Amino acid sequence: MTTNVWLKQVSAPQGPQPRRHFLQGCPLAARDLQVTGPCLSAQEWTDYRLAWNSSRYEGVNILRIPAKRVWLPDIVLYNNADGTYEVSLYTNVLVRSNGSILWLPPAIYKSACKIEVKHFPFDQQNCTLKFRSWTYDHTEIDMVLKSPKASMDDFTPSGEWDIVALPGRRTVNPQDPSYVDVTYDFIIKRKPLFYTINLIIPCVLITSLAILVFYLPSDCGEKMTLCISVLLALTVFLLLISKIVPPTSLDVPLIGKYLMFTMVLVTFSIVTSVCVLNVHHRSPSTHTMAPWVKRCFLHKLPTFLFMKRPDGSPSKAPRPSQARLIKSEAAATASALGPASSSNLYGNSMYFVNPASAAPKSPAGSDVAGIPRDFRLRSSGRFHQDVQEALEGVSFIAQHMKSDDQDQSVIEDWKYVAMVVDRLFLWVFVVVCVLGTVGLFLPPLFQTHTPSEGS
C-alpha cells in the first residue's frame, strides 16, 4: 500500500512530501485489539538548500546520502500500540538536482484498533491509521494528501483478511489552527472459510443431533443422555470462541449468539424430554386421562402431524378378552351340574352370554364339556364345594385379566400421547432451528460497508 502525502514546509518555497508502501496484509490481533503490518514509509519533500545545477557536475542528477545527514520530517503514527515510533532502518535518501528528496525507510506499524465482533466470523473491521508530525504544527509543516486513497502496488494478499478499501483524508481542527494530520481507514474483511469449516459447520451438525432426541423412542432410555451430550459439546465450542474473540461487553459475536441459541434449544429439548418421559410412563393407578387430552392428542393432533396408529383408529380398541373365554368355559361346566347347582353357585351373576351357550348340544350320553351324565349325577353332591371354589377362582382370574386389559389399553394411550407430544416438539424444534440459523447467518453475508465522511 502506498500513501502519498505532501508536506509543505512554511518557511521554504516547497516542503517535504512523504509516501507509504504497505508490503503485505496486516495481521489483526483481535484479542489484543491491534493491527500490525510491515510497510515502506516513503516520504518526499523539497529542500531548496540541496538543489544544484546538474550541467556543472557532469550531468549528475541523483545523489544517495545517509538519512541522518539531511533534515527529515518527524512523521509518526500517532495511535501507535507498541510505543516504537522510529522506523526499522534509516536507509539512504535520494536527492535530485531540483532539491526534491525521496526517503523510503521500512517500518512495522502496530496500531490500536477498535474491533467490532458483532458479525464474527463474517466481520469487517475499520482500523484507523493517523499520521502527523511529532514536533511541528500546522504553521510550520502543512500535510496535504497527494492521492485520495493509498496504493496497493506492492501488496501481498493475506490468508485471513481481504482489504476492502484504503481511503485517506486530511484532517484539520477548525478550533485549533495548529493541528493537521493525515488519516487512513484500513478497511479489511475477514475470510470466513477457516471458521466456517472449524466452528460453524460442526456446531450446526451437533445441533442437528438434538433433533434426533425427539425421534428417539422413549423406551430406549437414552433421550436424556443424548441431550446432555449435545449440550456439553456446545459448551466446549463456546469456550473455544471465548479464546478467539476479545473480551468485550459491547457486542456478542455472531458465532457466540448462535451457540447460545442452540444451547437454549438443547435445554428446551431436555425439558421437553423430561415431560415426554413423564407422560410415557403414566398408568391408570397414578393418573387419569382428561377428556381434552384424549380429544387433542388422540384424535386431532395426530392427523396434523401425519401420524396414524397401526389399527387405524385414534384410540386403540380393547383386544379380545381372554377372561370372557374363561367365563364361558366356567359357565358351561357349571351348567353340567344342573340348574340348582348353577343357581347356587352364581346367584344373580351374569356369566352366560345366552342360554344356548350355557347348555350346548352334545353327543348322546354326555353333557357339556364331555362329562357323562350318569357320572355327573353320582358325583354332583360330592364335588359341589370343590367346584364352587374353582369357579370363584376362575371368576377372580377373569376379573383380574379384564382389569389388566383395561389398564393396558390406558397405558398404550398414554404412550401414544407421549409419542404425539414428541412429534409435535420435533416439528417445532426443526422450524425454530432452521429459522434461527438462517436469521443469524444470512444478514452478515450481505452487509455492506459505508465509507466514512471524507474517504
Image (spheres, helix red, strand yellow):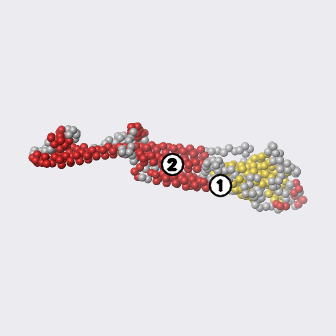
For the point 77% across and 46% down, the residue is 171
Q: Nearer the viewer, residue 288 or 293?
A: 288
Tell me the number on the disc at residue 289: none
What secondary structure is found at the residue carrying circle 1?
loop
Q: Nearer the viewer, residue 266 or 443?
A: 266
For the point 72% across and 55% down, the residue is 81
- Is 383 positioned to the left or the right of 39 in the image? left
What is the distance, in whole Å, between disc 1 and disc 2 at their CAs? 30 Å
Image quarter for residue 65? bottom right
Give the amino acid at mark 2.
Answer: Thr
Q: Nearer the viewer, residue 349 or 308?
A: 349
- The x and y percentages for residue 244 are 61, 55
- The x and y percentages for residue 347 are 20, 40
Q: Earlier in the sequence, mark 1 or mark 2?
A: 1
What secondary structure is found at the residue carrying circle 2?
helix
For the point 60% across and 46% down, the residue is 445
- Is the residue marked by circle 2 packed among few (<14), some (14-19), or many (20+) residues within 10 Å? some
Q: Dot 1 corresponds to which residue?
A: 31
Residue 111 visible at all: yes
Q: Dot 2 corresponds to which residue?
A: 267
- The x and y percentages for residue 179 are 81, 47
- Is the residue marked by circle 1 packed among few (<14), some (14-19), or many (20+) residues within 10 Å? some
- Is 231 positioned to the left or the right of 188 in the image? left
State which mark lies toward you, 1 or 2. 2
Report the number of discs.
2
- The x and y percentages for residue 142 are 82, 49
The C terminus appears in which quarter of the rendering?
A: top right
Give the amino acid at mark 1.
Answer: Arg
Residue 372 visible at all: no
- Cβ atoms at labels 1 and 2 below 8 Å apart: no
For the point 64% across and 52% down, the residue is 247
- Is 159 positioned to the left or the right of 43 in the image? left
